[in-house]
Amino acid sequence: MKALLYIPLLYIVLAAQAAGLPPGVMVMDGRPAPALVLENIDGEPWDISKQRGHWLFVHFWATWCGPCRREMPTIQKLAETLQDDRLEIVMVNTAETEDEVFSFLGIVAPDLIPLMDTDGLVTEIWQPRGLPATFLVDPEGKIRYLALGGQDWNTPPYRDFLRRIIAH
């Protein structure tokens, strides 16, 4: 009976591999991305509805999250390596203070400027199913891919995947 429970998971993993997706990345249904209007840590406003025309790497994270802490340097390196105006990296910190975020990023990923979801309401709307979670939103504002859990974003499978999707 337990073996039957693993069949849907196995199907998802095999379908992702067949589609050329890196581990942990799954295809989504293309629904419109929910509202996301926040200020960054510098107090500057950011609105997803004004970001059409390029891919968005919308990453939900927190400093207390172990996988987030391990993943963050790989996103920093990805941002340095994959400097492309067709992909914008959007970091959404979930329900923490500016001091907590500033202290952490200053050491681990000093070039990333996070959006501050201090009350956690945007995270609730997006429903990431845990942290970290990365939504890849296409230039029309539709969610095309989701990566759950910490990934090593600065390795060839992930960089190549991102290059491939933003090229189309």
Image (spheres, rainbow, N blue to C red):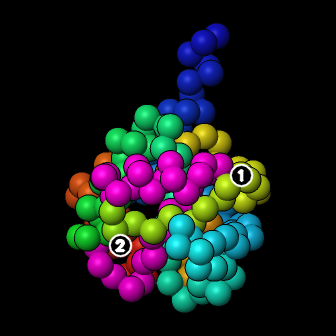
Q: Position of residue 107 (x, y in %)?
A: 31, 52
Query: 10 Å neighbourhood of mark 1: few (<14), some, or many (≥20)?
Result: some
Looking at marks 1 and 2 on the same chain, the residue that comes earlier in the sequence is marked by 1
Q: Residue at x 55, y 57 (%)?
A: 98
- Secondary structure of the residue carrying tag 2 is helix
Q: Position of residue 52 (x, y in %)?
A: 60, 86
Query: What amino acid is labelled 2 in the image?
Result: Arg
Indicate yes or no whether the magenta region holds residue 41: no
Quadrant location of the N terminus in the rendered image: top right
Query: What amino acid is labelled 1 in the image?
Result: Gly
Quadrant location of the C terminus in the rendered image: bottom left
Query: 10 Å neighbourhood of mark 2: few (<14), some, or many (≥20)?
Result: few
Q: Could you tell me if the residues under marks 1 and 2 are in contact, i.e. CB atoms within 8 Å? A: no
Q: Position of residue 18 (x, y in %)?
A: 40, 51
Q: Residue at x 45, y 76 (%)?
A: 88
Q: Which residue is mark 1?
A: 120
Pick whichever, 167 or 116, lies toward us. 116
Pick whichever, 79 or 97, lies toward us. 97
Disc marking residue 79: none
Pick whichever, 13 or 116, lies toward us. 116
Residue 166 in sight from this viewpoint: yes
| Residue 80 falls in image quadrant | bottom left
Q: Residue furthest top?
A: 1
* 79 lies left or right of 63: left
* 44 lies left or right of 22: right
Magenta part of the chain: 82-109
Q: Which residue is mark 2?
A: 164
- Secondary structure of the residue carrying tag 1 is loop
Residue 133 in sight from this viewpoint: no
Nearer the observer: mark 1 or 2; the answer is 1
Pick whichever, 77 or 54, lies toward us. 77
